[in-house]
Amino acid sequence: QVQLVESGGGLVQAGDSLRLSCAASGRTFSMNGMGWFRQAPGKEREFVAASSRGVGGRTNYAHSVRGRFTIFRDNAKNTMYLRMNSLKPEDTAVYYCAAAKFVILTARPEDYDYWGQGTQVTVSS
């Protein structure tokens, strides 16, 4: 089993930055891919970013966040991050981190095996 705990959400203004963290514990060696998703009220969960395992791991971003968000890992701390710059009101959502045993860089929620509880990000205009 793998446990994921997100933190770092909050209320910010448009144009501000935030850094989300996802601390992993348990059988973390079994995870090959990790990612971030978000879900706004009344909308489906959508892909934000994904990262593969290892030094210099590859990344994949949703078009809506490419160039503004950066996903990165600190493997020594078993922690994944999402740096979010130039935030917009449409980025408001609950952000979830997820881990996949077998699939990397995927944007499909069904490919992920473990999920955190989510952290709220609210961007005011």
Image (cartoon, rainbow, N blue to C red):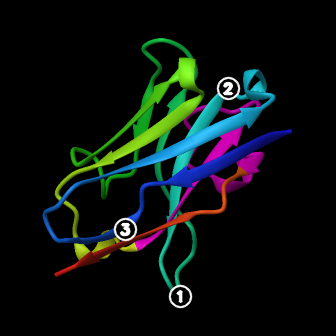
SS label for mark 2: loop
- The single residue placed furthest to the top in the displayed view is 55
Residue 16 placement, left or right of 25: left
Distance in Å between CA atoms under marks 3 and 1: 20 Å
Using a 10 Å C-alpha cutoff, classify the residue at mark 2 as few (fewer than 14 neighbours), some (14 to 19) or many (20 or more). some
Residue 74 placement, left or right of 18: right
Give the image location of residue 56, x and y in percent: 42, 14
Relative depth, front residue between 78 and 109: 78
Q: Amino acid at mark 1?
A: Gly
Give the image location of residue 4, x and y in percent: 67, 46
Residue 86 lies in the magenta stretch: no
Q: Residue at image x 22%, y 69%?
A: 88
User: Above or below — where is 95 with respect to 41?
Assistant: above
Using a 10 Å C-alpha cutoff, classify the residue at mark 1 as few (fewer than 14 neighbours), some (14 to 19) or many (20 or more). few
- The single residue placed furthest to the bottom in the displayed view is 42
Residue denoted by label 1: 42
Q: Are marks 3 and 1 in contact (CB under 8 Å)?
A: no
Q: Which residues are magenta?
A: 93-114
Residue 113, labelled with which disc? none
Give the image location of residue 87, x and y in percent: 22, 63
Residue denoted by label 2: 32
The nearer-to-camera label among 3 and 1 is 3
Q: Residue at image x 55%, y 35%?
A: 105
- Which numbered disc, 3 or 1, marks the residue that appears first in the sequence? 3
Distance in Å between CA atoms under marks 1 and 2: 31 Å
User: Above or below — where is 26 with respect to 62?
Assistant: above
SS label for mark 1: loop
Residue denoted by label 3: 10
Distance in Å between CA atoms under marks 2 and 3: 29 Å
